[in-house]
Every structure is written in C-alpha cells, then in structure tokens.
Image (cartoon, rainbow, N blue to C red):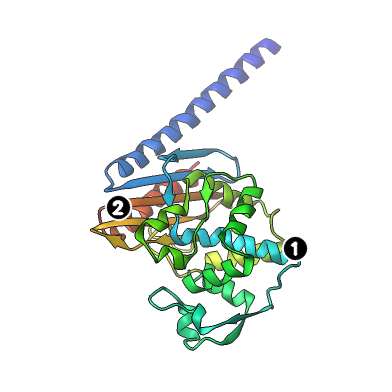
C-alpha cells in the first residue's frame, strides 16, 4: 500500500512538473514570436518573486541601460541614508552649472537659475520618478561617482551590470551609452533584492517603491496593456536615435498580480530600427503576455 501511494505521488509530481514546463514553454514560444520579428535585439527576463522561477530570452547581450540605471543609483543613495552617512532632509546645494541645458531635467525647469538648496529626498524623487538627468549626476557626485554605485551593486552579489558613466558623459558621444549596460536577468536579480526588503530600511523601501509606482514615465511600456489599476513599480530608459537606429528603449519593474504575487519583468530593446513608439508597443505586448500567463496560474 505504501509503495502504491509513493508511486501515485511520483506520477502526480512528474505530471504536474511536465505541465508546468509545458505552460512555460508556451509562454516562451509566444515571447519568441515577438522578439524574433522585432527590428532589433530584444532581451527579456522574468522572475517570479514568489517562487523564484525564471525565464530569459536573449539574455547574454550587453544592453545599454540608459535611465534604467537610476534605479540602482536610488538604491545606493538610500543605502547611504540607512548607514547614516546621508539624510533625506540634507540640503543639496545646486549651482547653475549643475543644471546642464539640452538634457531632460524637470529640476532645471523648476529652478532655472540654480544656486538653490534642495532637500535630498526631492532630488531623489526628480531622479527616480521623473528620470531627471541633472538630478542623476548631482546624486552621482554626492556619492563619489558611478564607481560607488557599481561597488554597491557588486556588494549585493549581482554581476552583469556595469555602471560607468554619468548622464553628462553619455551626452558627449553616441558610443558612451553602451558602457552602462546590463543583462536582463541581472537587473531582475536587482529588483528581487529590492523586493526582499532586506537591503533597505522599511521606510526607505516604501519611499523608493512609491517613487517607482507613481512615475509618469513609460505609460505605454510595461503598464501599456495591463488591466487598469495594476500596480507596477518600474524604471524606464530611453536613448535618442542615430541614422534611424534607436539604441535603447527599456522598462524594468515589478508587476503585482491580482492574487498578490509579484513578477519582476525586464525588457531591454536595443539597436532598434524603428520608432520609440513601436518599441514601446513591443514591450507592452510582452508585459501583457507575462501578466496573463502568471495571473492564470
């Protein structure tokens, strides 16, 4: 009788495992149909933050992050706050020379003349939630440069992310942006580290989560085709184009499912021979497939 029970259990486990793989294979085929027909390189990483199961597609390429790297920058800043070396209410002196022209900067629009003191939490909000390029470089300088952020990410045990240059340096030449790169799965691991809530204090975790869920950027990317009201904490990244090629259209974030589970999804689109809007639509299609798959399981 015991042998029979064991046999039934073994068969049940084998069948359920085969079914699980079949379901994942189905999702992978659907994703591959999108990525294979894309006009560029598309990297995808999916990490179920409840089970640890993962799926990747075209993961080995070095994708330029663009402003997606403002998420690890935010993590590093808040780590310094937790360590007592910085305070969210610290006054950050912003000179006029810190507010570079011809770059995306709502901060410069608010303080066009510079020469003001702004609280650290406000600069962080502009940088992460509004993707402010001047705010980004102000925070890099505050920490001691991109290498400090790279060291923090490495200290978390995450490889395949390279944070090398500031926004100002990326604006100097087209090729520089490719120095700041990540694999999709490595970035999903970083999102997972954030999700575990053990690398930041509870209050700073909530602050960064709020900045990422309230961001107005990327409405047509991961969030684009998801059911209204779906919570997505994410960070986008976008390049310009050269000779009709867009270097980067990215979105990386955590999607909350109706049952409360959370899925990390990273979609990096690189060297895209189309419009930014076309790349955004591609990201939205991928996110919808992922949402529908995991919401149904």
Query: Residue at horizontal 54%, vertical 64%?
Result: 212
Residue 285, image x, y percentages = 35, 51
Residue 166, image x, y percentages = 49, 64
Is residue 1 visible in the rendered structure shown here? no
Q: Are marks 2 and 1 in contact (CB under 8 Å)?
A: no
Position of residue 62 relative to residue 103, above or below, is above
The quadrant where residue 25 appears: top left
Task: Give the labeled residue for mark 1.
Answer: 83
| N-terminal label among 2 and 1 | 1
Q: Marks 2 and 1, Cα distance to the nearest angstrom? A: 41 Å
Task: Give the labeled residue for mark 2.
Answer: 272
Is residue 221 visible in the rendered structure shown here? yes
Q: Is residue 279 left or right of residue 133?
A: left
Q: Residue furthest right?
A: 84
Q: Is residue 262 left or right of residue 133?
A: right
Total labels drawn: 2
Q: Is residue 183 left or right of residue 42?
A: right
Dot 2 crowding, Cα within 10 Å, few <14, some 14–19, many 20+: many
């Amino acid at each position: 009788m015991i042998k029979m029970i064991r046999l039934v259990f073994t068969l049940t486990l084998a069948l359920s495992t085969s079914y699980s793989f079949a379901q994942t294979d189905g999702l992978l085929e659907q994703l591959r149909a999108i990525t294979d027909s894309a006009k560029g390189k598309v990297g995808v990483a999916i990490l179920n933050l409840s089970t640890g199961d993962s799926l990747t597609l075209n993961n080995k390429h070095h994708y330029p992050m663009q402003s997606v790297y403002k998420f690890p920058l935010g993590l590093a800043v808040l780590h310094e706050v937790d360590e007592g070396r910085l305070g969210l209410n610290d006054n950050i002196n912003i000179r006029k020379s810190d507010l570079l022209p011809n770059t995306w900067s709502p901060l410069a629009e608010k303080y066009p003349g510079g020469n003001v003191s702004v609280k650290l939490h406000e600069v962080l909000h502009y940088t992460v939630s509004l993707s402010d390029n001047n705010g980004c470089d102000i925070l890099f300088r505050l920490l001691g440069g991109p290498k400090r952020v790279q060291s923090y990410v490495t200290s978390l045990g995450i490889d395949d992310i390279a944070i090398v240059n500031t926004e100002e340096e990326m604006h100097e030449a087209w090729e520089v942006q490719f120095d700041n790169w990540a694999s999709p799965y490595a970035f999903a691991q970083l999102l997972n580290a954030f999700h575990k809530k053990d690398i930041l204090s509870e209050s700073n975790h909530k602050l960064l989560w709020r900045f990422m869920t309230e961001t107005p950027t990327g409405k047509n990317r991961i969030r684009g085709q998801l059911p209204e009201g779906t919570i997505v904490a994410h960070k986008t990244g976008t390049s310009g184009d050269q000779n009709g090629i867009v270097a980067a259209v990215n979105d990386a974030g955590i999607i909350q499912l109706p049952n409360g589970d959370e899925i990390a999804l990273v979609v990096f689109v690189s060297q895209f021979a189309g419009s930014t809007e076309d790349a955004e639509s591609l990201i939205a299609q991928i996110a919808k497939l992922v949402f529908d798959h995991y919401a149904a399981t």
